[in-house]
Image (cartoon, rainbow, N blue to C red):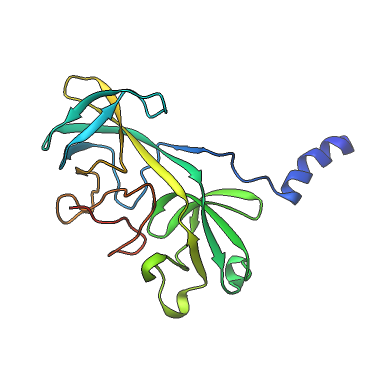
Amino acid sequence: MRPALLLALILPAMLGQPAPKLPYYDWKACPFEGCAYREWTANKTAVVYDTWQPDRKEIVRLPLGTKVTGVMGVVITFRPGTIRMDRDLPNRNLKRGDIILTYAYRGEGVSAVWLKGRYDPEFDIAFTKWPNNQGCNGSSCAATYVDLGDKVWWAQVKLKSGRTGWVNMDKAAFDGVDMLAKSPGAKEFFRGRYTPVLRLFEYRIAA
């Protein structure tokens, strides 16, 4: 192999790559533990658009109780979240002061991240203290979520007529999205941010 070609292959790995270009689109993401695309029931009025893109147009408003089928989705990151390491974590090769950028959340303390020059679609951030003292506890904490970032979840749904459209899940609320829910309406992706309450690393309850 020619030296120039070898250097071209090795150098990016040595120096790392820039963080993903924004906005970053995580297609087919379903951003919490138990999240599932299947039959959903609107537990408040939901607006369905023809696309998730900025030039979208409203096609229908779903009344309370309307059933749809969640098909797929995309989490769009306009500004990644920021985690700051507060102490060394040798077993994870992390040092105090390291910065972790977060993208789509996966659930159970796992998130897509950019760290030390590479993108990791499933990285365990369970050692992080979230806002409002959620997340890790006591000596298990090694980092702080200093900025949740700006993210939005759009879901494609299939209507009873067979037509498909897109719903902004920041503003909608459906029963059936969470397979682990103990009661209807137990989860909602709220205000475009990953805001954990009640259960570790999960989303704000919206009944």
Residue positioned 42% across, 51% down in the render = 105
In what quadrant of the picture does the N terminus appear? top right
Report the residue that reaches farthest toward the left.
65
Residue positioned 37% across, 59% down in the render = 108
Residue 91 seen in the figure: yes
Residue 45, quarter of the rendered image:
top left
- Residue 8 place in picture, x, y as percent: 80, 38
Report the residue that reaches farthest toward the bottom.
139
- Residue 110 place in picture, x, y as percent: 44, 56
Q: Looking at the image, is 91 positioned above or below residue 47?
A: below
Residue 134 seen in the figure: no
Left/right of residue 11 with respect to residue 50 in the rendered view: right
Report the residue that reaches farthest toward the right.
3
The count of marks equals: 0
Residue positioned 42% across, 28% down in the render = 54
- Residue 82 place in picture, x, y as percent: 53, 57
Residue positioned 14% across, 54% down in the render = 183
Residue 135, quarter of the rendered image:
bottom left
Q: Looking at the image, is 196 positioned above or below residue 74?
A: below
Q: Looking at the image, is 168 positioned above or below residue 60?
A: below
Q: Looking at the image, is 91 positioned above or below residue 122?
A: below
Left/right of residue 181 with respect to residue 24 in the rendered view: left
Left/right of residue 81 with respect to residue 51 in the rendered view: right
- Residue 178 place in picture, x, y as percent: 24, 48
Left/right of residue 90 with respect to residue 164 in the rendered view: right
